[in-house]
Image: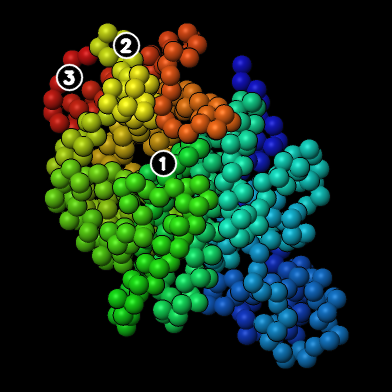
Amino acid sequence: MQKQKSSFVELFTKKVKNYLSNDFINLDINNSIGDAIDKIQHLKKSTILVTKNNKLAGIITEQDISRRIVFKSNCDEPIKNFMTSPVIFVYEEDLLFHAVGEMRKSKLRHLPVVNLNEEIMGILNLHEALSAELGVSMERIDSITFSKDEEGINSLKAKQVSLAEGMMKEYVNPEDITYILSSLNNVVYRRSIRIAIDRTQKKNILEKIPEFCVLAMGSAGRMESFLHPDQDNGLIYNLDKNDDPKKVDMYFKVMAKEFTKILDTAGIPFCKGDMMASNSLWRNSLQEWKNQFDQWVDVSDDLTLRYIDMLYDFRPVYGNPELAKEFRTHILKKLERTPSFLKYLYRRDSETNAGIGLFGQFILEKKDKNNLGLLNLKHTGTLPLVEATRMYSIKHKLREVSTLERLKKLTELKIFNKDEFDFFKNAHRFISNILLKNQIESAKTNKKIKNYINPKKLLNREKKLLKIYFKEIRKLRAKVKMDFSGTVVHI
């Protein structure tokens, strides 16, 4: 029987946005301090969040007002003269543990919360009840709270192995562990991008930086990353008619090279296929992205299908998410106008299948000399299920990105029945569990973290279950082939 999650684990699966408080007032940077004090007293709020161009620019707390403002200021002075800036903040999509650790490390009672575009969404209060409820977990939270420089980023990434191992011992569901690892990687992404922005702005390439959005793709976009994913990212920016396209792209090229280098140093290595924002193919204005995607769909050759396969599972991790949302809408409309595309995409996805033969034997690696005789649990395990689910998601124009979210929605649409949903959910969970255990063991013994396992080391019960799940995934792939290519396959 699976143990009930501890309060520590619950903390690691809850987002900041579920704990927002409205105990603040929001004022523009040019408001007077006298007006600010009147409003905070009248509305009985404890914090003033200061904005510039609708984005968080500073903070003034109740303690600031009582200690250094009330008797020492001209009421007509602007609040920008009294605010603390830059502001320590978290994103609404961050996990709660990250916010709690940040508040404890910085000795903060109030922490502003923003969306990916750095617009204020609320404030987080560090209540004594929260600390009391967490108890001994606070020490563990403190251990993975990190500074905002590159050293801190590297430190957080390095601690993911021990964190994953601890959660495995607490019987945490593998999808929760991969979600948490993905969330931590998102934190690494955001901190890396902010450092890159600071460095790039010092080069004085542009006076005004256009709105932009950084995308995480593939397993990172699905929030299903294991311990050592490589980089798959892209960048969308707005291009105004008065902008110089060459200068704008030069700015984002420099910035992208900076943050991808920081990520690589931190332990999220460069993509071997160069599917990163530092490559001009994956860094475009919104209109250029739309045009490029349309061309990829119209061509639908092996290369463009590979690009679409990676791009489709994207998620915004920094910047204005509306750019990503508009691009997603365009993608769905284009695919709706091109129904024949799914046949071509199936041709690309047909290269993967569950790692089991017709006679119930595992299909082991025969070409890669470094992994001969091993079982690729990603390529012949989770990936065939992920790709099959993606195919049906595209067909039914779903916006969901994670595999389990897609399975749930497809079950609601009667594409899968309840038993199939439960089975494939458990299959994904079981395969992910084995893969995580193997990666943790490799990391602890200083071996290369990879997606291959030695099936001979599995318990007999694990082998039997894995073969059962592989057989049903293989049947699902046959169903996909029939639905999208019109070919009947006999298993």
User: Relative to 200, is 58 on the left or the right?
Assistant: right
Q: Which residue is mark 3?
A: 489
Circle 2 residue: 361
Relative side of 131 to 119, left or right = right
CA–CA distance between discs 2 and 3? 19 Å
Give the quadrant of residue 122.
Answer: bottom right
On the rendered image, what quadrant is the N terminus found in? top right
Which amino acid type corresponds to the residue marked 2 in the rendered image? Gln
Image mark for residue 251: none
Q: Is residue 16 visible?
A: yes
With respect to residue 34, does 123 lie above or below?
A: above
Residue 312 percent coordinates (x, y): 32, 47
CB contact under 8 Å: marks 3 and 1? no
Label 2: how many residues lie within 10 Å, few (<14), some (14-19) or many (20+)? few
Between the C-alphas of marks 3 and 1, the distance is: 29 Å
In the structure shown, which secondary structural element does the residue marked by tag 1 occupy? loop
**Which circle marks residue 219 in the picture?**
1
- The mark that comes first in sequence, 3 or 1, is 1
Q: CA distance from mark 2 to mark 1?
A: 28 Å
The type of residue carrying mark 3 is Val
Q: Residue at coordinates 71% horizontally, 45% vertically from top-left?
A: 143
Residue type, numbered disc 1:
Ser
Is 413 or 176 nearer to us in this picture?
A: 176
**Residue at disc 2, secondary structure:** loop
Residue at 50 percent across and 47 percent down: it is 267
